[in-house]
Amino acid sequence: MATEEKNDGKNGGKKDGKNDGKLKEKRPAEPRPKRMFAAIPFPGRTIRETIVPLENIPELKDKNFSNIHLTLLFLGNVKPDDAPRLLEKASLARAESFEAVVRGLGSFSRKNGPILWAGIEENPALRALKTEVDEKIGEFVEKPDGKGRFSPHLTLTRLKAAPSKELVRALESEKETRFGTFPVRSFFVYESIIDRRGAEHVPMLEVPLL
């Protein structure tokens, strides 16, 4: 006659599971992606000395131009594991040095506020550099749009409201003004670190031009 197993009903005949198997180990947090871009830096002091009308524009008169640059390629978020390969490929870029011409002031709308800019004349050397950068590290762009748009400019500031009539007139009067030139002898790959104080652009690589 088969012996019946006792079951006191407390656990329904099931193991309580307190010591059943190993505790699940917590996965370590994944490293945060790096927000990166390739650009040509422009010295803030040189900009203020070259673009003289800035002194007559209240929105720009006291602006700190320490982070001014010409973006060649915005990469967006890059996985930390991909960053070394990106920098290695960027270091292989080859292009000629050139003089960048600053011409005109203007503004365009953005959802988080209008942008005031100084234009950079496009020339064959700048276009060749842009093409070289795209070819070397374009595969790392987070959100490629496939449109190949390139409007070289320096972002001077972001406004909190629409430009005033006075500002619009001031920009209109300088839209074709040739302010001066900058020697371009290298470009950089930056990581953009954003906190409450704003954005800090940390250079990760400088690539000299020929």
Image (spheres, grey):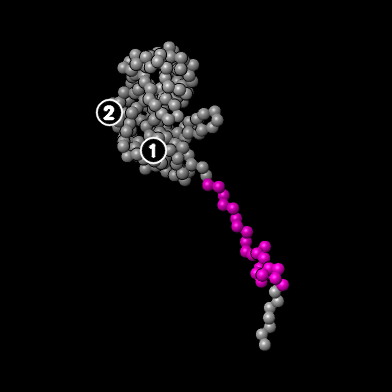
Question: Is residue 9 within the magenta segment?
Answer: yes
Q: Residue furthest bottom?
A: 1
Report the disc number at residue 48.
Answer: none
Residue 26 in the image, given as x and y percentages of width and height: 59, 53
Q: Is residue 81 visible?
A: yes
Percent x, y for residue 73? 38, 34
- Numbered range of the magenta stretch: 8-30
Residue 19 is situated, as x and y percent measured from the top left of the image, at 67, 63
Residue under pointer 1: 90
Judged left or right of residue 152, residue 203 is right
Q: Local crowd at mark 2 within 10 Å, few (<14), some, or many (≥20)?
A: few
Residue 178 picture location, percent across and down: 32, 16
Residue visible at 36% across and 40% down in the picture: 144
Q: Along the line of sight, which residue is nearer the eye, 39 or 204?
A: 39
Residue at (39, 26) in percent of width and height: 109
Q: Residue at x 36, y 20 (%)?
A: 106
Disc nearer the start of the sequence (2/1): 1
The crowd level at tag 1 (other Cα within 10 Å; few <14, some 14-19, many 20+) is many
Q: Give the CA separation, mark 2 to mark 1.
A: 20 Å
Location of the N terminus (image quadrant): bottom right
- Tell me: residue 23, above or below residue 173: below
Q: Which residue appears at 63% of the width and 59% of the height?
A: 23
Q: Residue furthest top?
A: 56
Q: Residue furthest front?
A: 9
Amino acid type at mark 1: Ala
The amino acid marked with disc number 2 is: Pro
Give the SS element for disc 2.
helix
